[in-house]
Structures are given as C-alpha cells and as structure tokens.
Image: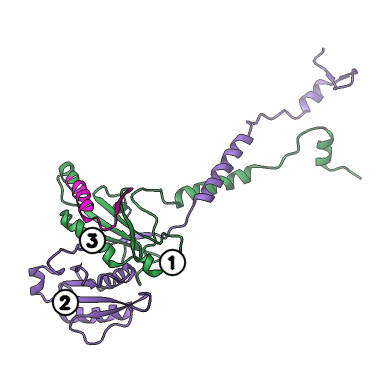
Chain colours: A green, B purple
C-alpha cells in the first residue's frame, strides 16, 4: 500500500505543522472589529442606562459628540448600571453628578454652577464664541427632581444651549 | 568533508550525494518565528473579548434650559399662550406616568397618544407656540425625555422645561 505524503514526511524527520495563516487572519479581523466597534472609553461619558423614547428624535452627530464646546453632565443612579431589579425608589435617587470624570455630590448646585461657569468662560476667552452647550446625560430611572438642579445650575452658569442624551432609534 | 557527501547522525558512513540530487532537493524555507506574534495576538483578542461591552448608540435631542423663577416661561413666551405638558407619576413604584396637556380635557394615554394630541394642537396653533414640559419632581427621567421627545417629533420650534411643581 502506498504511504501518504504526511507519513513520508514524518518518516523523513521534517516538521508537520498546521496552516496558521487563516487563523491569524481571522484573529486580526476580530481584533480590528473590537477596536472599531468599541466606543473609546471617555471620562466624559459615564456608564449609565439612558432613556429610550418612542420614535426617538435623538440624532447622532459624530462632530457634536467630539465637540470641544460642550460639557457633559452625567447623572448617575444610586442603583448603578448592573442591578436590573433595583428598588425604584432607590434607583430614583442620584448617586452623584459627574463632569469630565470629576464627581460632584448630587444636589450641590453651587459647585456644579462654578464648574460649568469656569468651563464656559474658558471657552469664550479662547474661542471668542458663545456657541457652547451643556449635555444632560442622565440615567432613565432617576427622578426629574435629581436632574433639574443640574439644568438650573447650567442655566445659572449662563450656558445658552442644552442637549439631552437619549438612545437612538434603530436605523438612524 | 567533500561537498558531495552527507553525514547521517549516529552513522559514521559517509554517503555520497550527487550534485543533481542536491539541485533537486527542496530548498529550506526561511520563516520568521510566528509563535510570539500569535501569543500577543491572542492576548489582545482575549483582552478585547473580556473588556468589551455592547453599548446602544446614543444621540442628542436639542432643548432649552429651564430658568428659575420664570416657571419655565419667559414673559415673551407667556404672551403666546404656551402649551404645557404636565407629568405626574403613576403606579405603586412610579413605573408609569400620567400626561396632561393644558387646555385639553382628555389626557393622553401613552407616548403615541401624546404625540397625536400635540400634533393636533400644532395644526390649530402652529409650531411657533412655546411648549413647556412641566414634570413633578418624582417623575422618572425616562418619562420626561419621552414627553420632550414627542414634542420634538411634532417639530415644535421652542420646547423647554419648567422647574418641577
């Protein structure tokens, strides 16, 4: 019976190896996918459960998301993001406000106003422009009473515009 | 040793290899060591697999900030008789909401109904009339954004928030 090529090569003492090229190709494709699909971790955007309105009118403008003339106020729920069955009363309370990674005690309007005012003045001084806005990014479970002081602080800081962050409608 | 001889390990016999046999022998391939690269690649893949969390795409809805002491409506807007959307919580755990629209006796049942009623009002008074979302303090943010979103959907030009009642 004729011996197979593999057997012959093995007999000859040569290396018998798997073809690694397709596996490496697929692995690199996966890595590229994860790099591109994963949103770059940003200290501006805290992890939270955003509201998802019916027929959401939210628009995703990448230029706006990276705009230097914006300041994002995150309102985090005390229940965190992992607890799906958190007590609604507990989840309705704000854990803290977070601006550019800086933690502010929820309800400390004066501190938030000072921070926002500082950012707005800095922007006006460097860019000579009033085109500045605050982005309210709040957990969908928190009470309006926890978000409202943040909006009032932004208003008191003189910021002219506000955007609300929500989940996009599929296909938009 | 002559160029035409071959020494086999453990065998002292010198074998003759002809020039022709040498020519026909497949040449040894040069290959860089792949193992470290594959190791690093798998480490990267594992890192991304473990750290990756799927996030729903988010966007922004433009709005106006509330002003303290104005009730959410400036004197200028007051002249235009703004449309107020009142929100109060419903259900044992505030898992629901009750919407009301000013000057409208029938309350909207849900977000779609709110949109329909706002659109109906817009057809009567136009889209320039200010719309003010006025929730109670213990209404979930989800419902506040829902009401705001429906007003934006109707394409009202001036939508804002009032401080909580």
Q: Secondary structure at mark 2?
A: loop
> Which mark is nearer the camera, 1 or 2?
1
Q: Which mark is residue A7?
A: none
Judging by the rendered image, the residue that carries numbered circle 1 is A86
Q: Nearer the viewer, residue A84 or B143?
A: A84
Q: Residues within 10 Å of mark 3 (few under 14, many from 20)?
A: many
Q: Mark 3 or mark 1: which comes first in sequence?
A: 1
Q: Which mark is residue A149?
A: 3
- Chain letter for the residue marked with disc 3 in the picture: A
Location of the C terminus of chain B by quadrant is bottom left
Q: CA distance from mark 1 to mark 2?
A: 43 Å
Residue at x-position 88% and y-position 21%: B10
Q: Secondary structure at mark 1?
A: loop
- Does residue A48 appear to the left or right of A31 in the view shown? left
Q: Which residues are magenta?
A: A101-121
Q: Nearer the viewer, residue B58 or A47?
A: A47
> Which mark is nearer the camera, 2 or 3?
3
- Does residue B87 appear to the left or right of A17 in the view shown? left
Q: Which mark is residue B126?
A: 2
- Chain letter for the residue marked with disc 1 in the picture: A
Quadrant assignment, res A138 = bottom left
Q: CA distance from mark 2 to mark 3?
A: 31 Å
Give percent across and percent down for residue B135: 25, 72
Give percent across and percent down for residue A51: 35, 66
- Does residue A70 appear to the left or right of A10 in the view shown? left
Q: CA distance from mark 3 to mark 1?
A: 24 Å
Majority SS type along the magenta span: helix
């Amino acid at each position: 019976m004729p011996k197979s090529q593999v057997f012959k090569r093995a007999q000859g003492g040569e290396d018998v190896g798997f073809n690694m090229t397709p596996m490496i190709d697929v692995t690199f494709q996966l890595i590229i996918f994860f790099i591109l699909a994963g949103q770059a971790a940003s200290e501006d955007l805290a992890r939270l459960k955003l509201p998802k309105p019916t027929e959401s009118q939210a628009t995703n403008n990448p230029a706006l998301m990276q705009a230097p003339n914006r300041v994002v106020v995150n309102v985090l729920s005390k229940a965190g993001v992992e607890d799906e069955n958190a007590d609604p009363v507990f989840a309705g309370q704000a854990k803290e406000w977070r601006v550019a990674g800086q933690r502010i005690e929820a309800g400390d309007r004066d501190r938030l106003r000072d921070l926002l005012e500082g950012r707005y003045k800095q922007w006006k001084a460097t860019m000579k422009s009033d085109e500045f806005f605050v982005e309210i990014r709040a957990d969908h479970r928190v009470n309006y009473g926890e978000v409202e002081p943040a909006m009032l602080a932004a208003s008191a800081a003189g910021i002219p515009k506000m955007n609300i962050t929500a989940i996009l409608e599929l296909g938009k | 040793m002559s160029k035409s001889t071959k020494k086999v390990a453990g065998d002292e016999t010198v074998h003759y290899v002809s020039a022709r046999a040498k020519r026909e022998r497949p040449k040894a391939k040069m290959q860089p060591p792949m193992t470290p690269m594959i190791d690093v690649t798998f480490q990267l893949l594992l890192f991304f697999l473990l750290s990756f969390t799927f996030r729903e795409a988010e966007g922004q809805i433009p709005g106006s900030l509330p002003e303290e002491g104005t009730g959410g409506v400036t004197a200028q807007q007051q002249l235009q008789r703004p449309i107020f959307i009142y929100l109060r919580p419903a259900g044992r755990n505030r898992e629901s909401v009750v919407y009301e629209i000013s000057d409208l006796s029938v309350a909207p049942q849900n977000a779609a109904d709110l949109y329909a009623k706002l659109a109906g009002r817009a057809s009567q008074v136009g889209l320039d009339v200010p719309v003010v979302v006025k929730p109670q303090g213990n209404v979930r943010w989800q419902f506040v954004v829902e009401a705001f979103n429906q007003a934006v959907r109707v394409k009202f030009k001036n939508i804002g928030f009032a401080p909580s009642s």
